[in-house]
Image (spheres, grey):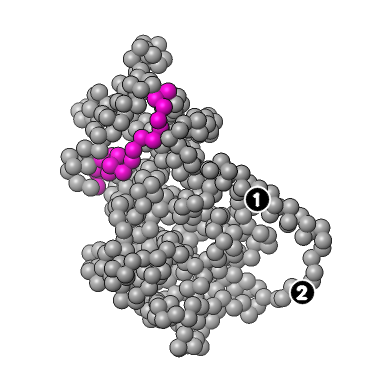
């Protein structure tokens, strides 16, 4: 039911003049979903309070409750068309009364670690783009059919929301910045092995995929006590995000996964001078895929000892500095980091090797990040001891990866198994850091165990691959035409 409802919402948004892209669809679906989720959350808390013979003070004032403005019901439980706003009346209420009211929560909340503050922050960043009040009424009616009460319902909703984020990433443009394949994230989390009580940080949170997957991993890591759940809710996950849409989606994604008041801050991480980072600011674990290819201004570069315009290299300096001694990290970065010969790249590799134990490098093939042609690696390191040996694994799924043929769990199964013992294989090997060139610290991926395949491919195999690529190109062009 949820899946069809999401499709119907997209169809309605497609008709609206104010929404022109997959990014708009996710953003506008998010705020309506959030208010319905909030209504169900309040009902649950009110019911729990009654069972404990306690009183419950509602977060939302009566006139702004879902069942008053969005979905007033008759005694039979059906939508009361006499009371339900629609058309211009509905749009004007949302724009002129509802959004300003919700925005005010940011200044009225006791502290940033409350759901009230998050409500205010989200609606400070958002605006209603749905121009037709009739389309908005359709969407509200569809969302009103959804329920967020049971664990199963919440799980299904979070899964579908992840699907929407993935579609947004596949649509290209800047949507791809917010989406890292969840299969890859789960693998990184398994290697880093977070434990309850450790703090987990992503300074380039995007859609908060790393934080959500770490939460899912920890939920099943042991039988959780009430104290454990409180720790996971309040004192485990921390993130920062620069872009407004990503911040909203990341916050919403964590809420749908069950973290009521996510500790995500809307800020440019790189605007902070890393020399100001103190022990109290540090984290046990870093999981991140910082944006690469971006260029930062000179005043931002002044916050870092190694000056470079490459955004990902600045983030890596930030991560090394903000990681606690003995802390662990899994960070995705462009593979050119391993071999670039500019001074900044060489200095950064030297810093990483001297201050951390870079124990594992996972080399990923092209196509892992759909819509981005760059090749990437995952760096796994621990802070505090210099690197002596590095275990490399070159992922070779045996097929071209892409939108219609994405990375899957089986592709990474061998990596996870061999990584436990840093074992050699056709796809993996170890290097001694003492043998590196001390002028360049070149860490290029050079597989000494790979047998060269000199056999020519069959014409049928080549034609099949061409047909698959043509099909993928046609889908991309269709998306582009839809966006124009």
Q: Is residue 109 above or below residue 440?
A: above
Asked which secondary structure carries label 1, the reply is helix
One can see residue 231 in this view: no
Residue nearer the viewer, 298 or 236 = 298
Residue at 46% of width from left, 55% of height from top? 177
Give percent across and percent down for residue 196. 35, 56
Q: Is residue 283 above or below residue 113?
A: below
Q: Give the alpha-carbon distance from disc 2 to disc 1, as whole Å.
A: 28 Å
Residue nearer the viewer, 40 or 86 = 86
Q: Is-magenta flag for residue 214?
A: no
Lateral position of residue 454 relative to residue 413, left or right: right
Residue nearer the viewer, 110 or 52 = 110
Question: Which residue in the structure is indicated by mark 1?
Answer: 472
Q: Which residues are magenta?
A: 113-134
Give percent across and percent down for residue 350. 41, 81
Residue at 60% of width from left, 49% of height from top? 476
Residue at 65% of width from left, 50% of height from top? 472
Of badges 2 and 1, nearer the viewer stands 1
Residue at 34% of width from left, 32% of height from top? 35
Give percent across and percent down for residue 382. 39, 71
State the mark number for residue 454: 2
State the mark number for residue 287: none
Q: What is the residue that sits farthest to the front in this orientation? A: 484
Q: Is residue 147 above or below residue 236?
A: above
Give percent across and percent down for residue 13. 47, 33
Residue nearer the viewer, 236 or 377 = 377
Asked which secondary structure carries label 2, the reply is loop
User: Which mark is first along the chain, 1 or 2?
Assistant: 2
Dot 2: within a 10 Å radius of its alpha carbon, few (fewer than 14), some, or many (20 or more) residues? Answer: few
């Amino acid at each position: 039911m949820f899946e069809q409802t999401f499709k119907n919402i997209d169809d309605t948004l497609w008709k609206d003049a104010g929404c022109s892209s997959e990014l708009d669809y996710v953003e506008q679906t998010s705020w309506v979903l959030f208010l319905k989720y909030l209504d169900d959350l309040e009902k649950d808390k009110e019911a729990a309070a009654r069972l404990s013979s306690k009183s419950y003070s509602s977060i939302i004032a009566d006139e702004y409750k879902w069942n008053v403005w969005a979905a007033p019901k008759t005694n039979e439980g059906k939508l009361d068309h006499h009371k339900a706003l629609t058309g211009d009346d509905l749009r004007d209420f949302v724009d002129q009364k509802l959004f300003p009211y919700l925005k005010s929560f940011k200044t009225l909340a006791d502290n940033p670690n409350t759901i009230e503050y998050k409500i205010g922050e989200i609606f400070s960043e958002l605006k209603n783009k749905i121009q037709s009040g009739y389309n908005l009424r359709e969407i509200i009616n569809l969302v009103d059919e959804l329920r967020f009460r049971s664990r199963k319902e919440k799980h299904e909703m979070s899964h579908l929301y992840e699907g929407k984020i993935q579609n947004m990433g596949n649509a290209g443009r800047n949507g791809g910045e917010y989406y890292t394949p969840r299969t890859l994230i789960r693998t990184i989390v398994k290697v880093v092995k977070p434990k309850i009580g450790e703090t987990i940080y992503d300074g380039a949170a995007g859609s908060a995929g790393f934080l959500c997957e770490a939460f899912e991993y920890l939920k099943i890591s042991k039988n959780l006590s009430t104290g454990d759940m409180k720790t996971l809710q309040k004192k485990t996950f921390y993130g920062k995000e620069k872009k407004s849409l990503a911040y909203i989606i990341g916050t919403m994604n964590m809420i749908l996964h069950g973290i009521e008041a996510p500790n995500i801050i809307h800020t440019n991480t790189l605007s902070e001078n890393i020399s100001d980072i103190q022990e109290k600011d540090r984290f046990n674990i870093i999981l991140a895929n910082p944006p690469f290819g971006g260029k930062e201004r000179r005043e931002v570069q002044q916050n870092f000892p190694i000056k470079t315009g490459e955004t990902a290299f600045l983030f890596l300096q930030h991560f090394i500095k903000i990681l606690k001694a003995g802390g662990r990290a899994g960070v995705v970065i462009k593979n050119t980091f391993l071999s670039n010969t500019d001074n900044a790249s060489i200095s950064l590799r030297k810093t990483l090797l001297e201050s951390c134990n870079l124990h594992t490098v996972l080399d990923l093939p092209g196509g892992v990040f759909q819509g981005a042609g760059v090749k990437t690696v995952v760096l796994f390191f621990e802070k505090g001891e210099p690197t002596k040996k590095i275990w490399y694994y070159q992922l070779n799924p045996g097929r071209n990866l892409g939108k219609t043929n994405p990375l899957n769990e089986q592709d990474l199964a061998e990596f996870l198994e061999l990584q436990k013992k840093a074992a050699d294989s056709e796809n993996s090997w170890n290097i001694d850091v003492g043998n590196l060139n001390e002028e360049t610290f070149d860490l290029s991926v050079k597989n000494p165990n790979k047998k060269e395949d000199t056999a020519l491919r069959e014409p049928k195999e080549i034609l099949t691959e061409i047909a698959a690529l043509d099909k993928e190109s046609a889908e991309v062009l269709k998306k582009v035409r839809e966006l124009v």
